[in-house]
Image (spheres, helix red, strand yellow):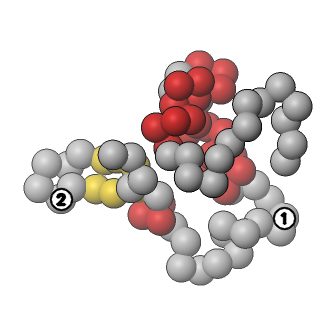
């Protein structure tokens, strides 16, 4: 999708770069990404049976801490 008011995103941009604007509130990344991944119809994420929550999230079984795989 093209958002004309969105700053350019480089191919080497990291998850943390997006959090400058998408950490909380109306533009928070979690709701935006989850909605996109689980929308109805032809969907690149749900159409692949290997994709699941752990495709992006990690769970430390020792501490129970739940995080994002791509975060530093």
Q: What residue lies at 84% left-to-right and 64% top-to-bottom?
A: 41
Residue at the image position 84 percent from the left and 47 percent from the top: 1
Residue corresponding to mark 1: 41
Q: Foreground residue, 50 or 3? A: 3
Q: Is residue 42 left or right of residue 22?
A: right
Quarter of the rendering containing residue 65: top left
Secondary structure found at label 2: loop
Q: CA distance from mark 2 to mark 1?
A: 34 Å
- Residue 3's place in the image compared with 5, above or below, is below
Instruction: Measuring from the top left, give residue 43's x and y in whole percent.
Output: 76, 66
Residue 32 lies, with reference to residue 22, above or below; the image says: below
Q: Viewer-proximal residue, 18 or 8?
A: 8
Q: Position of residue 58 (x, y in %)?
A: 33, 57
From the top left corner, tell me how far across and down residue 49 is, in percent. 59, 80
Q: Residue furthest left?
A: 62
Is residue 62 toward the left or the right of residue 21 in the image?
Answer: left
N-term mark: 2 or 1: 1
Which residue is identified by label 2?
61
Instruction: Count neighbours of disc 1 (C-alpha within 10 A) and say few if under 14, some if 14 to 19, many if 20 or more.
Output: few
Secondary element at image label 1? loop
Q: Which mark is residue 17?
A: none
Residue reaching furthest to the top: 25
Q: Is residue 3 above or below residue 20?
A: below
Residue at the spot x=56%, y=46% of the render? 13
Q: Residue at x 65, y 26 (%)?
A: 27
């Amino acid at each position: 999708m093209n958002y004309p008011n969105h700053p350019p995103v480089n191919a080497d941009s990291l998850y943390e770069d997006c959090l400058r604007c998408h950490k909380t509130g109306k533009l928070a990344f979690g709701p935006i990404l989850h909605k996109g991944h689980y929308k109805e119809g032809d969907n690149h994420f749900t159409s692949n049976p290997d994709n699941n929550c752990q495709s992006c999230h990690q769970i430390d079984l020792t501490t129970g801490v739940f995080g994002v795989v791509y975060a530093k």
